[in-house]
Every structure is written in structure tokens, then in C-alpha cells.
Image (spheres, rainbow, N blue to C red):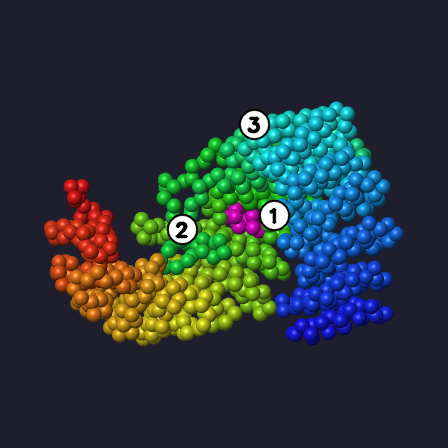
Amino acid sequence: MSNAVNAYMIANLIEKMSNQDRDFRYMALNDLISELQKDSFVMEPMIESKVVRAVLQLMDDKNSEVQNLAVKCLGPLVKQVKEDCLIDMIDQLDEYTAQTKNEELRGIASVSLKAVITEVNQAQGGVICSRVIPKLLRNIQNDNLTYEMEMDTLDILSEVLTRFGTQITVERQTEIQNALLPLLHHARPAIRKRTTVAIGHLVSHTNDSLFQQLFTYLLDGLRSDSGSNEKRRTFVQCTSVLSRYSTIRLGRHLPELVPIIISYTKKSEEDDELREICFQTLESFIYRCPTEIAPFVNEITQLALEYIKHDPNFAGDDSDDDLENEDEEMDEDEDDEYDDIADYSDDDDDMSWKVRRSSSKVLCAVIETRLDLLQQLYENVAPVLINRFKEREESVRVDLLQTFIALLHQTSASEEREDKYPTLGKLGSLNFDGINILPVKRPDNSASIIDGSRQVLMAQVPKLCRALAKQVGSKSTQTRQISFQLLRELVVVLHGGLEDQIELFIPTISNLLSGTLSDQYQIASSNLKIEVISFLRVFFRSHTPNAIHSRLGKFSPIIIQSISDKYYKITSEAFLACMEFIKVIRPIYYNPENNQYDISEIDQQHVPFIHQIYATVLQILGTSDADQEVKEKSIMCLGVILTQVGDVLQSQQGEALNVLLERLRNEVTRLISIKALAVVAQSPVAVGDSLQKCVTVAAVELTLLLRKNNRGLRIASLECLCILISRHGDHITNHSLANLLNEVRPLVSDTDLHLLPLALQTVECILVKNPKTIDDIKTSILPTLFCLIQSPLLQGSSLNSLLNLFAALAKASPSDYQFLVRGLVDPLLAAKKSNVSAGSATAVTNKQAASTVAQCVAVLAANTSESNCKETTTQFQSYILDPSTNESVKYLSLLTLGELGRRINLSGFSDIDQQVIDLFGAQSEEVKFAAAFALAKSKSNPKNVTCYFTH
């Protein structure tokens, strides 16, 4: 848009802004905002002042909607105007904020001024500071200023300090600090609070001298005996603000400050608000100055433990022995847990709960920052927290539970995490949404070492569970939900530990998930149900099956009812728990020592559970209106049933597999069905004619899916095909395998490096399972492989898969060894020998291809006869000895000899080491590197190690 058109349009909008009709004024502002926000918009200097005046006039409009839009317009407008107009805008807004006749206009102007300060360019900060700060300081020092104006002044000053604090001179900073400090004694708490915020923004930019003056002022105020508790609250709160905005500098003064705050906490007889602020300040110090506060941590912890019980309105005994006989009282009516108010004085102004809550947060801060004190915290803090779970104030009770969860999180953080149950890597992923299917058996000596903190925690589990048993049955949904969250974290930390305590929770779990609670408890919320089911899922996964087999009869109805819930999120989580439940009924582990599966016997008492779950899953799969997430989880659950207990369902196995195939053909459920089929195919108990027929059909279906553009579908299909061929390749026809090779060939490319290794693995699986397919592979795949070798992108899993495929080729067709070697080497040798004179120092090209060829040749040699291996070694040895060989060929030959030496015994070639060492003095740097590489790689093989220190 040209400048002339722009000017005409803006003039038209200015005219509409003065129109009698409010709709015209509103639309004019709206159109102006739209134009100002365009990147291409440019405003003529001569019209800027008119626009600014017009917008500012509308701030005093009679219509509130027009006023609000005028304020909104100032943000984008301030980015377009020059400095002169910006000054006019600020002056006008200052005038509006200073007037006292129109309170509404003054409030709008204050908001507008903050908006201008927020949006103005950083480079114009000097203008803002020079025009705004002097007026703000005059307002602050004006004793006749109204309360509202004083509040707005401090807000605007904080905004200026936040945006342009670095541009304010030391002299001006001194003026601001001197003006703010007296306000810490203001009669109104809101003014004092805003003053501390402004001081925080200021202190981020002041020098050490000003900071020291400020701290001395605060310290003197804290030490003074004449100040009221209200003033002390303000000064303590101000030190907390300093810890947030100037952590390092305040940290140096904590030895002076912390004892004073601790003394206030102890001496404030009736002022619970001061205690709360003191604890909040100590919490801030612990988080932000953990090193400097370290000498006081024990004292602060003891103080928090004392005041976490601070409840002057409670007339009962708060000793730590209250829970000793609680298990005997569990059968009594628990409805009175928080209803009996006879022991509480009727005090609506009770603030002690704030002290207890802030004490809990201090303990949480200590827990989260002092991992080194973990065992000590379990010994001293955990028992008190457990005893305080009976807290009558819900917000405090929730914080106490969260604090204990933080303690459990720290215990998890202290443990060196390792993969407890690795999956079968080559055959594809056996992990679905955290469910580890057919996990690898852990060796006997792999039991995790229980450290001191866990030992203390395990000793506290009975008492902890008795306390939580009351909380999970309380009236508060939030308390119950966090209690189950705590139980879940406890099981994760201890890798079990609730075998003897779970009976305390089964009745409550059953009531919560069945919805049969009494009227006064109301129906449990969906989030609570999900948390309960999540706990069950972790409980089943973390405990040994033998430890909970006797209780499966109590869990089975709960699980079956949960997977039939109407709410899809509950059903989805219940399916995950159901999968873990099935794994408990019949555990199966893969034993890598003998490459076999350890299959447990099924207790006949549990067989009905399997049939009930199977029938429920099939019923859900048969519904057409199920949520997508529920469909996916139900299909995977069916896969787990077939994987773990397929032999129990032998007569129904065909029906279940047909359901999987049907879902495989459905575009919506295709992907998850492929994953489920991959899991079933690896199961040692899912066998028989039904599975063989399923594999035959599935191989054809999956081959066709490789044509789809859906990348995730291709990946899952290739993974599943690898498993089907490896485990059941005998039942896949040669025709199907030939079709599969034709579909895989386009995927043997470096255009998708995630698909490439899977495609190569698929070809390898076909070749290993059916060596007769070698001719088809040589025809359709091998030419593509020879082209792929030249790619500079081959590395990582793609390269490893390529090497494995060449190893399989060497084993499947020993007679083709020379053909394969020549196919690898000849293209590279021909390219390197062409137009290169002997002995020249021409730079070596395509080093990555040379490295790939060297590794492939070495893999072929390592899987062939000794005579072929010797012939290949001799050939490359001759290249490095021939003076007429150019540097590129020597580079390739040295890499190949190094890879050969890493894989085979070269001790029969007595002179080869010296011949390689002689090339350390070659003219080409690439050849020197290759010679060093060859020697190092060769000597990584213990069979080729000799001493070279004399060289």
C-alpha cells in the first residue's frame, strides 16, 4: 500500500473516531489496530500526532467498549510513532493519571501507561525513564496522594524497572531506593507489598553499594525491638523478595539474617501470619541459596517439624503414637474422621493452618535440595509426616501428602536407574505404553541393592499404609487421589513392598471403582478412578506374581468392571492394568542364557478369570461406537491375552486371531493390530494351526501395506514381518517371500534412514530362514545394495544392518564370495584409478564409501572359508606394496586390512604389520591416517596383538 493511500485511510479513520455514533468510533479503532499490526504499515510523521491525540481522546469516551479498545490500541501504536509523539503520549497519560476529578479515566490511564511501557521499543527506554520516573517519584513522596494513585504509581514504577532497569543511572537508582524504603512503614499492607515488589525489580540492577545500604536498612529494621509485627512481616517478606531477585548477594548475608528470622518464628506468640511469612522466607532461602543456608538446615528442619503440629485450637494429643492402635480402629465407623468437632475450639479467625502448611513446604524444600540427607530425613521427618496425615485442614493435608511424595521422588532420583526388563532387541519392540511383554529374565545376582534410606522406608511401610488407609477412605476426593498417588510412588520406589499391606486398600479400591459408595461420600470422580487404576497397574507390575497370586480373586472383578466403564479414559487405563494383571496370572520370561522362555504353570483357580477377561475384551471389540483409544487398548489387551495365556484359550484362539486380522484390514485400527500381532507371534504359548494360518494371511497383508505412504505403518509392518519370518517363516510361501522382496526393494535406499535398517533386517530374516531365496535376493536386492554402498549417509543402525545382511549372504551362498567382493570393490577401484597418476598425493574422495566397503569385505571374509579369506587379504596387501598404486586405492586397502584384522587372525601374514607401519611416512595424510587405523583395528583383536614399543 502506498504512503498516499495510507495517509488517506488514516485520515478517514481519524474522522470516524470523532463521529457521534459510538459504533463508528469503535470500528475506526478496530480498523486502526488491524492496520498497525501489519508489517507493511508505515505512518507519515505529520499524521502520527493526530492519531495519538485521537486515540488518547477516546480514552475519555462515554462508552466503555470504546475506552477499552483505545487502551488496546496504544500497544501497537507505540511501536509505530517517533520519539516526539511518544513523549506527547506519555505526558498526556501522566496528566490523566495525576487528575483526581475522573477516577475512571485515571484508572484507565494507569493501565494504558503500563501497556505503553510494556510495548515500547527497548531503545526508547531512555525517553521513558527520563519522562516517567521523576513524576513517579514525586507521586511517591506526595503525602496527599490517594491510596489508589499510590498503588498505580508503584505498579508503573515496577514495570519501568522491569523493562529498563539497566538504563537507569546510579543516581536515579539511589533516588528510587530512598523513595521506596519509607513506604515499607506504610499503614496499608497492600502498599507495603507493592513496595517490596518494586524493590525486588530495582535490586536486580543496583550496584553492591546500594544493595548493602538496602540490606543494612532491612537488618536494622529486623533487629529493632520497637517495630510492630506488621512491620516485621514486611521486612521479612522483603528479604524473601531479595533472595529471588539478587540471590548471590543476599546469600552472603544469610548468617546474619537467618537467626533473626528463626527467632521471630519462635517468639511470635499469637502472630501466626508472621510465622507463616518467616517459613515462606526460609523456604525461599533453601531453594535459592542451598549452599549458604546449609549450616542452618538442621535447625530449620526441627523448627518446621515443631510447627507442622502447631494447632492451638485442637485439644487432643498429637503424639507420634496415635497410629499404633489405628489398625484396630479401622473397622469402626470412619465417617466421623473429620466430623467430630468437639476437640476443636470455635475460632473462625484461626490462622494456624497457614503455619502448618508453610512448615510443610519448608520440609519439602529441604527434601528437594538436600539429597545427601535422605536417610536422616526418613528417620526424622517421615514419621512426623505420616502422623500428620490426619490433619483436619484439607489444604494442609494435601501439602503433607505432597511432601511425602517429594521424599519418595528424591529416593528414586538417588537410585541409578537401569533397564530392569530389556526387550528382545532384534525381533522388535515388545513394549506397549509402559507394558513390558515377554521381558528378559533378570539374572539371580541382579537384585537391586537396598540402601539405608530404603531400609528405613521399608520399616515404616506398615505405619504409612495404616495412615493412608484412612485417607483413601476420607470424604475429600483430592485427599484420596493424592493418597493413591503416594501409594503408587511408594511401590515404584520399593519395587513392590505392599504384599502384606494391600488388604488394607482392597475394600476401598473395590468401592471406588464399583461406584457403590454411600451417599455421603458421593460418586468418586473420574480422575480419582484413573489414579486408583494407575496404582493397580504399577502394583501388578512391581510385585512378584507369587506374592499376589492368592489375592487375584479379589482383583479380577475390579479389573473386569473397570474395563467396562462408560468413560473412555477410565476404560483405557483399565486395559493397561488388565495387561499387567494377565502377566501376573501367567508370567513368561525370556532367558538369554539358553535362548528359551521360562513359562510358569497356570493355577486352575485362575483360569475362569482368563475366560471372563477374554469375553469382556471381545465384547468391547465388537462395539462400533467405542472410542479410538479404547479400541487400541482393547486390541493390545487381546494380543497380551494370546501372548501370555494363548494355550488356555486353544479352542478360541482361532476366533481371537481372526479378530486381529479383521482389525488389521481396518484402516483405523491397522497400526495397533500390527503391533499386537508382532507380540503374539513371539509368544511361546500361542502355537497351533490357527496361528500358522494367521501368519500366512498376515504376511500377505503386511506386504501390501509397504506400498502405503504412511511412514509409521511401514515401520510397524517391517518390524512385524521380521518377527513373523524369524519365528514362523516355515509357514510363509516362497511366492509370498518373493513378493515381499519386490516390495522391500524400493525401501533399500538412503532416502529414509529409519526405514532402511528395517528393510535390510527383513531381507536378512528371509535369507536366514529360507536360504533358497538367494537367487531372488541376488536379482532384486543385490544391485540396489551395491549402489547403496556409495552413500555417505550409511552409519549407525543402517550400517550394522547392512553388515549383518552381507554376513548372511556369505553363509547362504559361499560360492558367490568372489562375486560379492568384486561387486563391492570394483566400482570403487575403477573410480579411484581413473585419471589419477601413480604415487600422486591427490585427496581421497568418498571416504565414507571406502569405510563401508572395507567393513562389508571384512564381514564377508569373516564368514567364508579360510582360503577365500587368505586370498582377499593377500590381494589388498599387494595394493599397499605396489608403487604404482595411487593414494586412494592404498587408503581403501589399509581400511580393509584393518577391518579384516579386527575380525580374523592375521598372524599368518608376518610382514603385514611392518608394511603398514612403513606407510606412516607416506606423503598423503589420508594414507597416514588409514595406516594408523589399520594397525589399531588389527591390534584390537587379541589374536593379532604383538609389541610395537620398539618402533
Q: What stretch is highlighted in magenta?
A: 532-540
- Estimate the spatial distance between the alpha carbons at disc 3 and disc 1, rounded to whole Å: 45 Å
User: What residue is at 79 percent from the left and 44 percent from the top?
Assistant: 139
Dividing the image into 4 quarters, which one contains the N terminus?
Answer: bottom right
User: What residue is at 66 percent from the left and 45 percent from the top?
Assistant: 168
Residue 898, percent from left and from top: 21, 54
Residue flagged by tag 2: what amino acid is it?
A: Pro
Residue flagged by tag 3: what amino acid is it?
A: Pro
- Estimate the spatial distance between the alpha carbons at disc 1 and disc 2, rounded to whole Å: 31 Å
On screen, 6 above or below 243? below
Q: 10 Å neighbourhood of mark 2: few (<14), some, or many (≥20)?
A: some
The dot on residue 788 is none
Judge whether residue 466 is colored magenta: no
* SS class, disc 2: loop
Q: Mark 2 points at which residue?
A: 422
Q: 10 Å neighbourhood of mark 3: few (<14), some, or many (≥20)?
A: few
From the viewer's side, name the closer residue of 736 and 695: 736
Residue 611, percent from left and from top: 50, 59
Q: Name the residue under label 3.
A: 295
On screen, 49 above or below 118? below
User: What residue is at 42 percent from the left and 48 percent from the top?
Assistant: 419
Q: In which quarter of the image is residue 136?
A: top right
From the viewer's side, name the closer residue of 469 and 302: 302
Residue 623, percent from left and from top: 57, 68
Q: Say whether residue 334 is left or right of residue 922.
A: right
